[in-house]
Amino acid sequence: CAADLAEKYGADPHKAKIAGILHDATKETPYPEQLQMMERYGILLSDIEKQAPKLWHAVSGACFMEYELGIEDEDILNAVRYHTTARKGMTTLEKVIYIADFISAERDYPDVDVMREKAAESLNAGMAYALKYSLIKLVRREALIPHHTVEAYNEVLTELQQQEG
């Protein structure tokens, strides 16, 4: 899915395959081990990130790829690092990995078909829908929202509005 989206939207399909395959590399790693890995490599979590262990695998996954596997490509590392929260200023590859994680073939949740349609329409349309979906879900759970996610949503929405008018 990531390679197909990369091909469609002008990102490097090889990099997309690497990030797509490895984006959840540490997802099943126990939380204490993920924390140890991040601390070992000097990664500091924000206060909000500290309270959201389900998001840690993105950060620890990027650490694992860089320090254990020797991957140095910043675009690949950032695509993995922000595949759960997104961020302002995402590259095309980062957006591709974020969207691919939502729409890959094994995904089955309410609105997945709408999400796939939006991603086929344009990368920013897919991003806007995915971010809105995530934000609504977080608000309903009364969960803390990483500032990266809000900034990404505002940026993508602004870009869409500028394209429309």
Image: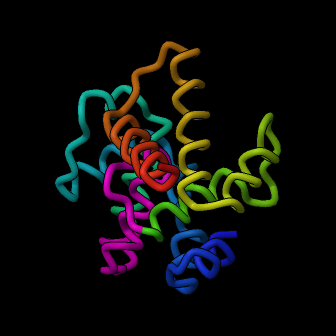
Q: Is residue 165 magenta?
A: no
In the image, is 155 to the left or to the right of 103?
left
Front residue of this view, candidates 13 and 128 = 128
Q: Which residues are magenta?
A: 65-91
Determine the residue located farthest toward the front in the rendered image. 165
Q: Quadrant of residue 21?
A: bottom right
> Residue 68 in magenta?
yes
Image position of 22 (left or right of 4): left
User: Does 46 sit above or below residue 125?
Assistant: above
Q: Is residue 144 left or right of residue 72?
A: right
Q: Going 69% across and 60% down the picture, which residue do you hit?
A: 121
Residue 78 is situated, as x and y percent measured from the top left of the image, at 36, 63
> Residue at the spot x=73%, y=59% of the render?
104
Query: Quick check: 17 above or below 56?
Result: below
Q: Which residue sits at x=30%, y=80%?
A: 72
Asked if residue 9 lies left or right of residue 33, the reply is right
In the rendered view, would you say 47 is above or below 120?
Answer: above
Percent coordinates x, y for residue 4 in the rendering = 68, 76
Q: Position of residue 62 (x, y in %)?
A: 38, 62
Rendered image quadrant of residue 49: top left
Task: Note whether 111 is above or below 70 in the view shown.
Answer: above
Q: Residue at the far left: name it.
A: 42
Question: Image quadrant for the N terminus?
Answer: bottom right
x then y, percent, for residue 160 = 49, 50
Specify how the rendered protein is coloured.
rainbow
Q: Residue at x 41, y 73 (%)?
A: 76
Front position in the image: 55 or 92:
92
